[in-house]
Image (tube, helix red, strand yellow):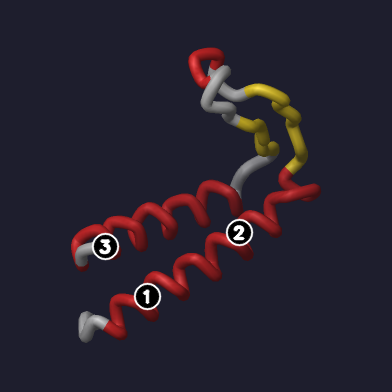
Amino acid sequence: MTTDDLMQQIEETERLIAVYRNANEVIVGTQDEIYSRRGLINRITLTAAEIGDRIVHILERRLAATRAELQRLGVE
């Protein structure tokens, strides 16, 4: 992954953290290669209280890992 890719990933992850922190509900679904033309299948809607904090925590860990990778590459 290039430095630009990592920077873009950081920006997108920061945006997603804000989105999920402010969400009222989250739609979760699966995507299957065979049925991908139909979009998400097996969808469920969860309240933000049920899953929002977990998603934010996952994204924060991803953000920290990406920043660590950039630092490893010598980019501040």
Q: Amino acid at mark 3?
A: Met
Which residue is situated farthest in the right direction here? 50
Quadrant of residue 31 within the rendered picture = top right
Q: Amino acid at mark 2?
A: Val
Q: Are marks 1 and 3 in contact (CB under 8 Å)?
A: no
Q: Badge 3, how many Cα within 10 Å: few under 14, some, many 20+?
A: few
According to the picture, the residue beneath numbered tag 1 turns out to be 67
Q: Nearer the viewer, mark 1 or mark 3?
A: 3
Q: Residue at the spot x=21%, y=81% of the render?
A: 75
Instruction: Give whichever of discs 2 and 1 has the lower sequence position.
Output: 2
* Mark drawn on residue 56: 2
Quadrant of residue 28 within the rendered picture = top right
x and y percentages locating residue 58 in the rendered image: 60, 62
x and y percentages locating residue 55 in the rendered image: 63, 55
Q: Nearer the viewer, residue 18 or 5?
A: 5
x and y percentages locating residue 70 in the rendered image: 29, 76
Q: Are marks 2 and 1 in contact (CB under 8 Å)?
A: no
Instruction: Give whichever of discs 1 and 3 has the lower sequence position.
Output: 3
Q: Quadrant of the N terminus?
A: bottom left
| Residue 43 located left or right of residue 8 | right
Question: As displayed, is residue 20 above or below residue 70?
Answer: above
Q: Residue at the spot x=46%, y=74% of the render?
A: 64
Q: Element under label 1? A: helix
* Mark drawn on residue 17: none
Q: Residue at the spot x=43%, y=57% of the render?
A: 13
CA distance separating discs 1 and 3:
13 Å
x and y percentages locating residue 46 in the rendered image: 76, 37
* Mark drawn on residue 1: 3
Q: Nearer the viewer, mark 2 or mark 1?
A: 1
Which residue is situated farthest in the front direction here? 34
Quadrant of residue 3 within the rendered picture = bottom left
